[in-house]
Structure formats: C-alpha cells, structure tokens
Amino acid sequence: MRVLLTCFDAFGGAQLNASFEAVQLVPDHIHGAEIIKITVPTIFQQSLTCIAEAMDIHQPDIVLSIGVGRCALGIEIERVGINWTDARIPDNAGQQPIDEPIRVDGPCAYFSTLPIKAMVDSIQAVDIPVYVSYTAGTFVCNQVLYGVLDMIAQSQKNIRAAFIHVPCLPEQATDEAEVLSLSAVTSARAIEIAISTAVQTRVDVKSLGGTLS
Ligand code: PCA
C-alpha cells in the first residue's frame, strides 16, 4: 500500500508551517505502507496541480493532506470539503478569491473517505488532543480537501482521502486564549497513528464525536 502524505509551505507572513515540520518527522514506512511525502505551495490552483502530478506518478491508495489550523484546539480530522472559496488573506501567489466556487459545476461538498472516527479514537488513546472537525475553512486547505476528493471521484479510482489540520508550533503560539500549540514531534506522532489506523481500517467505527453549537 502507498500513502501520499502532503503538507504546505509557510504562508501569510509566517516563517514556518507546522504541517511541514510535522510531516518531515513521520516515518517512511507505517504498518507495511510506503509513505511518499510532498510539500505543496500554499497557492489555490498550484496546490492541486502539484498533488495531481504526484498522484499520477506514485499511484497512491491513500492521499492524506496536512495543513496548519491556526485556531485549532487539537489535531482536527476533517469530515468535509466544500465547493467554496472565501480567502481572508492572499495565497502565496497573491491570489485572493472571494466567494467563488472551486469547480463551477461541481457538487456542493465531498466527505472524507478515510475512517476518521477510528483515527480520532486511536489518537485519543495516546492522550493527544484530537477531534472531528466539520469545516476545513474556506482557504487553500479546504480547496485541497475538496479538490483531491473531486479528482478521485472523477477518476473513479479506488483511492481514499482525508485532511488533517494540526495546531501551530509552540514558538508560533500567540497570547490568544483560544489557541493551542503542539510540538512537531507530537503532531507527527498523531499523523503516524492516523495513517496506521487508516491502513488497517476499512469500515469506520460509530463513536461519539459530533458537536452542539
Ligand atoms: N493552512 C491553510 C493553508 C495552508 C495551511 O497549512 C488553511 O488552513 O487553509
């Protein structure tokens, strides 16, 4: 089995991207699966072109994309990618699409196809804060989640995919009360466990994880 593991470069004036720092620490083999790591530019269209090329070359069974969620209160395993872009800041090419669909004639949303509840449960078991998230935002991470699931749907290939947001690094944590940080080592451990669970689990578990607003 082959897993394409993607992360992003730094964006929005930051020097580092926690997703990049964590992915570099993930082992190259997990539970018999080969892990292929790529860094994609935080640019709306190019991020997807770059992942599409890597999918063509490596023919992965699983695509797991990682990004930093600056307001994340733990590891966020994303359930849904929406067909919408509403960029609060410009991407690394200076593009800032506001209120535009990702694909004009595409479905409104796609759900992740990896066993996200099982992934949450196994990360929780080692006491790393983690939860299912029902929004991947409206910036490049959501574009990647939606776009990868859309590419897979259109190709009709049997590839499973999901997206994980990791919190910022301790050295990037601000004084905002609602922000949590995790070391790259801890986020890497969570990603490794998520992959190990995804490789071994076909049918997701039904465990508690929803939210009340
Ligand atoms: N986080 C951004 C894009 C790149 C990244 O790491 C996001 O949440 O959309």
Image: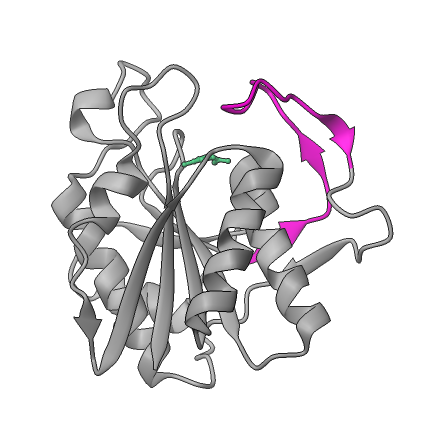
Residue nearest the viewer, comparing 18 with 74: 18
Q: Quadrant of residue 5?
A: bottom left
Residue 54 spot, x, y in % from top left? 45, 60
Quarter of the figure with residue 73: top left
Q: Is residue 155 left or right of residue 30?
A: right
Most extreme residue toward the right, as rendered? 105
**Chief secondary structure of the magenta span?**
loop
Q: Is residue 171 magenta?
A: no
Q: Does the rendering let one see residue 19?
A: yes
Judge by depth and name the residue closer to the eye, 193 or 16: 16
Q: Nearer the viewer, residue 129 or 100?
A: 100
| Left or right of 179, for residue 48 | right
The answer to whether 84 appears left or right of 200 in the picture is right
Q: Residue at x 57, y 49 (%)?
A: 49
Q: x and y percent of residue 204 in the render?
A: 46, 79
Q: Is residue 30 above or below residue 43?
A: below
Magenta region, residue range: 79-100
Image quadrant occupied by the N terminus: bottom left
Question: Please, is residue 161 above or below residue 101 in the view?
Answer: below
* Residue 122 rendering spot, x and y as whole percentages: 26, 69
Q: Answer above or below: position of 190 versus 135.
A: below
The C terminus, quarter of image = top right
State the colouring used for the structure image.
one colour
Q: Position of residue 152 (x, y in %)?
A: 62, 69
Furthest residue in direction front, as rendered: 57
Above/below status of 173 relative to 149: above
Q: Image point 84% across, 46% down: which residue?
A: 104
Q: Is residue 135 at least partly visible in the picture?
A: no
Residue at the (72%, 69%) spot, across then down: 154
Q: Which image quadrant for residue 12?
A: top left
